Structures are given as structure tokens and as C-alpha cells.
Image (cartoon, rainbow, N blue to C red):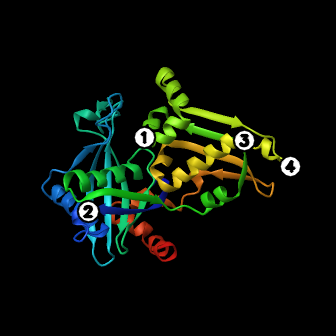
Amino acid sequence: MPREILKFHFYSLKFTAYSKLESEYSSTTILKDVITFLTNELHKGQGYLIDKHRNRENESPRELFMTSAVFMPKERRIRCTLALLRSGRVPKIKPADEFKLVPIKTLGSIAEETHFFIDYSRNYGVVCIEYNHYGPRMSDVEYYLRNVARDKLKLSKALDVNLYMSNTIDKTLENLQNVLNMQIKIQPSKIAQMDNDIKGQYFTGINTIGNRLKPNYIRVETYFQTPGGNITSKELNKEANSMVKTLLGKFKARPFNIDCFEDFVIKYEDKEGNEELFNLLREKKELEYDVEMSTLKKKRNWYELIEEDFNEFMVKFN
């Protein structure tokens, strides 16, 4: 049976009720109402589909819908799966008794499914979410839940999501003296998802190249300073330092921006003259399992896979 490496990351989420509802609704009650609404839709056989790209003229649809949501009252948790309908080139399948390929559209639409679990035992939610490269990301979960709470149920004016990371961002921000080099890999189509301030300040040129040449990815590698020796204030690359500090602060405060990058590595010298490396995508709090996929036949099995480590995380970090 095939084995796969499964990874899970952690986020906090907190709803803010509209002012007139503050006395009646907490973040937890809004979360429960959102999940209850989605569960009821599923029970009616309808579901609730949202196109994240519906207001973007030149982008393919990114259609999301909840496929399961189960309350676990004793544990004060919710088991969820969110699906992303696949667009673009349609794959084919081979019938068991014939040597031909049948377009899957004949049968229906292809969807990628991401499993995630929400602990609501605090006054905010803690999410443990599977990393699925082809499926919904946490930024999709955030968009989906916020849309239901704000636009459909009219309960929440905001949803704040924060990524649990090691202390490396804080350490880098505190100790960074001079950026030596920077490696960035990005899909041009994802630049539109960034916050407007960093998009306009740092990624306009990459966006222009993406629009004109339409590459799948753009990789940028820059060298600013030869490491070693004393660096005077005149030799500091203030512009690069400012950019890195701005981006790291943005990743910490608004982590959905992280999803825009395939790679983000900074080599820098700290205040003691030591050469250090910061790799954004390796700094997430992460669970990793080597799993025989046949053991995950039911959605409950996915929760059982992470349950013990989720319990430990809630004790250590919350």
C-alpha cells in the first residue's frame, strides 16, 4: 500500500462580532453558528459554494465548499473538510474493463479535499490543518468562514487568523543587522492575493513580468553584501533591511500572505557579525506523519492521527 508524508500546521482564528451584537456573540458562538449553518446545508443535500475569485476578471474560478463538519462536544472540537473544485485541464480515467480514457467531466467535477480540525475550548479557535499542495489552504478556510459569518449570517465584521511559528521571526527581526542575499520563488498569479501595500511597494515589477510573459513561476535571487568583516552604517543596505523587516512583520500579522510564496529564504548577518539563515516555509509549527494511506478510510481516522499531538500542542502553546 502507498505511503505518504502528511504535514499539519497550526493557526489561531478569532471572529469579531458587529458592534450591535457584541453582547450576544463571542468568537466561539459565531464559529458554532457558522459550522451549524454549513452542517444544515449539507444535511439538506445542498452545500454552500463560494468562488474566492468571483471578483477577479482574469483568473480561473477558485470554488470552495465544505464537505463535512462534525461537532465533538466532549472534546470541544470540530472535524472539518473543505473542498476545492479543480479547474483547468481535465484529467481522465481508464475504465477497469476497457483500454480507453474517459474524461472525468463525464462523471462530475474533480475536487481536492483538505482536512482540518478546530479546537474551541478557548475564547478563540485553534486550527490544525493538513497541508495539501493542490487543495484548499488556510487562506481559503479563512476566506470561506469569514464569508459565511459576514456576508451570509451577518454576524461578524472581521476574522483574524494567525500562524503559529517558531520564535525565528521575532529573533530575526530583533537581531537582523544586514541582509546578505535573498531568494524568492513565487507564482505571478498569486501576487494579486497579497496585501496591497507590500504588493505595490515591492512586487510591481514581478507582477508586470508575470502579466507579459506568463511564466508559471518567477525566481528572484539577489546579493547585497559579502559576508565577514565590520560593516559601517554607510555600508548597511537599508532598503533591503527595511523590505525584509516589513515582509516578516506582515507574515506574522497577516499570515495568508505566506501562501503567495513557494520559497522565501533570507541570509543575513546578525548584530554579532554571525551569518544566519531564515527560511520562511520551514518555520511553521508542524506535525509530520509517515502514513499508509489505506489506514485513513474514514474522516474520523484523520482526526485520530493528530489527536494526541493536537492535545499536547493545546497544553504547550495555549
- Cα separation, mark 4 vs mark 1, equals 40 Å
Disc 3 packing (10 Å; few <14; some 14–19; many ≥20): some
The residue tagged 2 is 19
Disc 4 packing (10 Å; few <14; some 14–19; many ≥20): few
- Cα separation, mark 2 vs mark 3, equals 45 Å
Q: x, y percentage for residue 23?
A: 24, 71
Tell me which amino acid carries mark 3. Asn
Q: Residue at x 33, y 56 (%)?
A: 158
Closer to the N terminus: mark 2 or mark 4? 2
The residue tagged 4 is 230
Q: Residue at x 28, y 69 (%)?
A: 26
In the picture, the disc for residue 193 is 1
SS at mark 4?
loop
Closer to the N terminus: mark 4 or mark 1? 1
Tell me which amino acid carries mark 2. Ser
Q: Are marks 1 and 3 in contact (CB under 8 Å)?
A: no
In the picture as drawn, the residue positioned furthest to the top comes out as 212
Tell me which amino acid carries mark 4. Asn
Closer to the N terminus: mark 2 or mark 3? 2
Instruction: Answer with left or right where residue 264 lies relative to residue 253.
Output: right
The residue tagged 3 is 237
Q: Are marks 4 and 3 in contact (CB under 8 Å)?
A: no
